[in-house]
Image (spheres, helix red, strand yellow):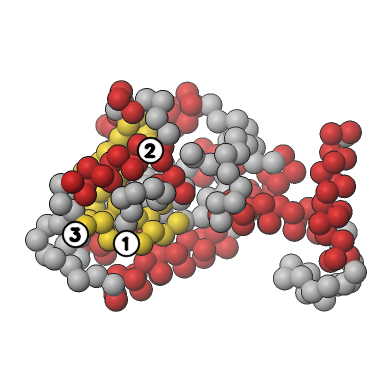
């Protein structure tokens, strides 16, 4: 228990203003916080700062926040947050784009936890509270059992039907192409223009740099990238960039 003392001392200092009765979105009318409330506020703050890309490079979810992340990732709030992000994409599409209609209009989707959900895998691995074992996650990917995320499936079909070419750029390895394609088709995803996976030349390369290279290839081929949808900031950062980027929530892991 001794290793928890610094955390609680820091947390007590951070939450001192709330203990005096200041208004808080999680406890709008109560005048003092018990231990559970303090932990809930800390973990929700950690989760939000993951989404803001302020918390970076974590290998595991903090042990004290595993139950909080589990509750969020399996909740109606996670679904609502995801659906809201998709609604923003639809709004953007309705006003933004003077499509060329010549085959150069492009949109990028990530795969994991963007089109296909890995939540069934992480349910068995403490929702990110265990250090990721590459053999385990690849075994899961080879099973082709990841369910489709219905909100992004609908968006995928909408964008495809507008005549925009869809490119899938995933950090999965090239050796996973066949089970990935099978999983996507089983999930209802059809009609993408290309699926880019990491080849031997990309081994050891940061995901962000690998995806920059993939986007640059599209730009060099004359495509206009109107948008990207993904669950990791490494799918968006760096140049060339899309006109807009839309991040889906994911508190379980961080990919650099």
Dividing the picture into quarters, in which one does residue 242 lie?
bottom left
The residue sitting at 28% across, 46% down in the picture is 215
User: Relative to residue 145, is residue 38 depicted above or below?
Assistant: below
Out of 6 and 170, give the one closest to the viewer: 6
Say the numbered circle drawn on residue 105. 3
Q: Which mark is residue 209?
A: 2
Q: Quadrant of residue 177?
A: top left
Q: At x 34% / y 71%, what residue is drawn?
A: 92
**Label 2–label 3 contact, CB within 8 A:** no
Q: Which one is earlier in the sequence, the residue at label 1 or at label 3?
A: 3
Q: Residues within 10 Å of mark 2 (few under 14, many from 20)?
A: some
At mark 1, the secondary structure is: loop
Residue annotated with mark 1: 243
Query: Considering only order in the chain, which callout, 3 or 2, is on the residue closer to the N terminus?
Result: 3
Q: Residues within 10 Å of mark 3 (few under 14, many from 20)?
A: many
Residue at 64 percent across and 41 percent down: it is 61
Tag in front: 1 or 3: 1
Where, quadrant-wise, is the N terminus in this rendering? top right
Circle 3 sits in a helix, a strand or a loop, which is it? strand
Measured in 3D between alpha carbons, the distance from the residue under mark 1 to the one under mark 3, in whole angstroms, is 12 Å
Report the side of 40 relative to 215 (left or right). right
Q: Residue at x 37, y 55 (%)?
A: 229
The circle drawn on residue 159 is none
Residue 108 image offset from top left, x and y in percent: 30, 52
Looking at the image, residue 19 sits to the left or right of residue 107; the answer is right
Above or below 74: residue 129: above
As drawn, which residue projects farthest toward the front?
Answer: 239
Q: Secondary structure at mark 2?
A: helix
Cα separation, mark 1 vs mark 2, equals 19 Å
């Amino acid at each position: 228990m001794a290793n928890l003392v610094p955390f609680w001392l820091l947390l007590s200092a951070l939450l001192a203003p709330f203990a005096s009765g200041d208004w808080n979105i999680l406890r709008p009318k109560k005048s003092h916080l018990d231990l559970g409330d303090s932990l809930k506020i800390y973990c929700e703050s950690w989760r939000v700062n993951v989404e803001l890309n302020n918390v970076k490079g974590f290998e595991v979810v903090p042990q004290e926040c595993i139950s909080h992340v589990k509750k969020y990732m399996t909740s109606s709030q996670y679904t609502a947050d995801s659906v809201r992000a998709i609604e923003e994409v639809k709004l953007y599409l309705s006003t933004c784009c003077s499509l060329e209609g010549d085959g150069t209009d492009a949109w990028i989707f990530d795969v994991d936890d963007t089109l296909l959900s890995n939540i069934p895998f992480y349910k068995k691995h403490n929702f990110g509270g265990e250090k990721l074992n590459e053999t385990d996650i690849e075994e899961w990917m080879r099973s082709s059992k990841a369910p489709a995320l219905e909100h992004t499936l609908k968006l995928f079909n909408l964008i495809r039907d507008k005549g925009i070419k869809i490119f899938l750029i995933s950090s999965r390895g090239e050796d996973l192409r066949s089970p990935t394609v099978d999983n996507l088709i089983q999930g209802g995803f059809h009609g993408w223009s290309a699926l880019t996976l990491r080849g031997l030349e990309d081994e050891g390369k940061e995901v962000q740099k690998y995806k920059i290279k993939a986007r640059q290839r599209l730009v060099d081929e004359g495509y206009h990238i109107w948008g990207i949808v993904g669950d990791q900031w490494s799918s968006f950062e760096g140049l060339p960039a899309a006109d807009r980027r839309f991040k889906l929530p994911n508190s379980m892991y961080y990919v650099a």
